Image: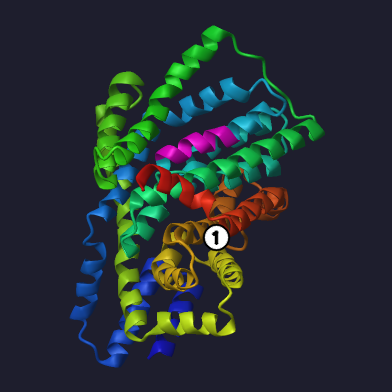
């Protein structure tokens, strides 16, 4: 019946069934074929979502949507443009900075591309930037969303394994800013080489005006960090605080969020949250079946039978996850694969926090890797160009992500030093 499980899963994916329902339907095929009571399915689905930590997901989704509806995207763009807009290729550099700041609010890559892309891609094209380059930089920098905290994949990884979500958040800080920093340097170099425009240097009055306008958005990230690290609230409580803060800022400070808009934001957030929670629920059934059939142990034994060398194991897992990330959604892949790969990595001496960072970074890179690079398709739809034009322009940014992946894989301190320093 295990063969039927995997074949049916692949068939459902191939015919276009969403990943969550593909997991659920293939699990149903297995349970019926094995003669297991269907009540097991509902029990495993409930146990998969019966987690206090998992409440972070709808909380941060709602906070991000509230801030977005409240004008955060526009103010982040204006603040970033004030910082770097007067440098050669300033609007492209602002695009990178926008994503780094917005990553601390949304926690998701697709939200980053959708929100900032509609502003930055047309603006860059209007100033003379190549459309392929404009879409590529927007899609690539969006990958910072799931890396720089708060991060939805890190929440899922912590929920699955019992690892500290606070430590996982911190683990992504250095790699995220490292990717962002290298992207800034490359973007400046390519802008100088191609002669992309630069804007006027803002006056101090304009700078401080935009700074205080964007400060409220930045303070949201600070509150989340300080609150979790200082022990004032848990990650789940931080999500609730972020929602309250977002309503306050949107209604009383920015005044772009109207009371009548809140029901619409709640509805959209509920739909997004339901999609993720459904995925978690169905993936838990799929994972339980795999565990009962001892598939994780088989995968681990197979990998370790090739070699017990830590560096080779890391390389094998990197190649495997990069391949998976090309075809499978990040959270779905984490749900089905992370516990197994964590066991393999810890068995060869890799720190659990570093293991989580390796897996998340691999799968996030899949968001900008054809043929199913979701961020590439979103950017292409905004820019109204073919995916092939983005892929070629995106190649240098993809290489940057892969270089940082190798650094994170073989230099543990990049992901473990900050969590150890601040949380012990």
Q: In this view, does 120 lie to the left or right of 163?
A: right
Q: In this view, does 314 lie to the left or right of 145?
A: right
Task: Decide whether residue 101 is among the magenta residues.
Answer: yes
For the rendered model, the colour scheme is rainbow
Can residue 69 be seen here?
A: no
Q: Which range is magenta?
A: 96-105
Q: Which of 367 and 390 is in front in this view?
A: 367
Residue picked out by circle 1: 362
Can residue 144 be seen here?
A: yes
Placement of the N terminus among the 4 image quadrants: bottom left
Q: Where on the picture, by quarter, is residue 84?
A: top right
How many marks the image carries: the answer is 1
Residue found at x 37% / y 39%:
64
Residue found at x 37% / y 85%:
294
Q: In this view, does 414 lie above or below 74?
A: below
The overriding secondary structure of the stretch rendered in magenta is helix
Q: What element carries label 1?
A: helix
Q: In this view, does 394 lie above or below 307?
A: above
Q: In this view, does 325 lie to the left or right of 247?
A: right
Task: Decide whether residue 308 is among the magenta residues.
Answer: no
Q: Where on the picture, by quarter, is residue 161?
A: bottom left
Residue 369, given in percent of the width and then of the height, sits at 61, 58
Residue 268, given in percent of the width and then of the height, sits at 32, 45
């Amino acid at each position: 019946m295990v063969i039927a499980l995997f074949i049916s899963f692949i068939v459902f994916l191939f015919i276009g069934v969403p990943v969550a329902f593909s997991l659920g339907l293939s699990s149903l095929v297995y349970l019926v074929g094995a003669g297991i009571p269907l009540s097991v399915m509902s029990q495993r689905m409930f146990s998969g979502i019966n987690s206090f930590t998992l409440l972070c997901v709808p909380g941060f989704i709602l906070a991000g949507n509230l801030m977005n509806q409240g004008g955060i995207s526009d103010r982040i763009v204006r603040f970033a443009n004030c910082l770097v807009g007067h440098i050669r290729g300033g609007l492209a550099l602002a695009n990178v900075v926008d994503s780094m700041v917005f990553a601390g609010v949304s926690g998701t890559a697709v939200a980053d591309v959708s929100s900032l892309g509609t502003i930055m891609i047309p603006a860059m094209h209007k100033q003379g930037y190549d459309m392929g380059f404009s879409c590529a930089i927007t899609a690539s920098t969006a990958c910072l969303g799931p890396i720089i905290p708060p991060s939805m994949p890190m929440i899922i990884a912590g929920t699955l394994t019992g690892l500290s979500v606070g430590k996982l958040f911190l683990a992504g800080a250095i790699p995220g800013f490292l990717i962002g920093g290298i992207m800034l340097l490359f973007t400046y170099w390519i802008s100088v080489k191609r002669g992309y425009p630069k804007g006027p240097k803002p006056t101090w009055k304009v700078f401080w005006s935009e700074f205080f306008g964007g400060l409220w958005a930045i303070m949201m990230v600070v509150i989340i960090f300080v609150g979790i690290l200082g022990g004032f609230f848990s990650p789940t409580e931080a999500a609730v605080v972020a929602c309250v803060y977002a309503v306050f800022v949107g209604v009383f400070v920015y005044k772009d969020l109207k009371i009548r808009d809140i029901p619409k934001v709640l509805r959209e957030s509920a739909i997004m949250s339901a999609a993720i929670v459904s995925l978690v629920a169905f993936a838990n059934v799929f994972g339980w079946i795999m565990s009962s059939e001892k598939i994780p142990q088989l995968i681990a034994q197979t990998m370790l039978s090739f070699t017990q060398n830590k560096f080779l194991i890391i390389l094998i897992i990197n190649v495997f996850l990069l391949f998976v990330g090309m075809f499978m959604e990040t959270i779905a892949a984490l749900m089905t694969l992370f516990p197994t790969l964590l066991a393999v990595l810890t068995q060869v001496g890799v720190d659990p926090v570093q293991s989580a960072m390796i897996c998340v970074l691999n799968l996030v890179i899949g968001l900008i890797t054809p043929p199913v690079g979701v961020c590439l398709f979103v950017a292409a739809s905004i820019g109204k160009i073919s995916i092939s034009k983005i892929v070629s322009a995106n190649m240098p940014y993809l290489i940057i992500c892969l270089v940082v992946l190798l650094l994170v894989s073989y230099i543990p301190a990049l992901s473990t030093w900050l969590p150890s320093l601040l949380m012990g």
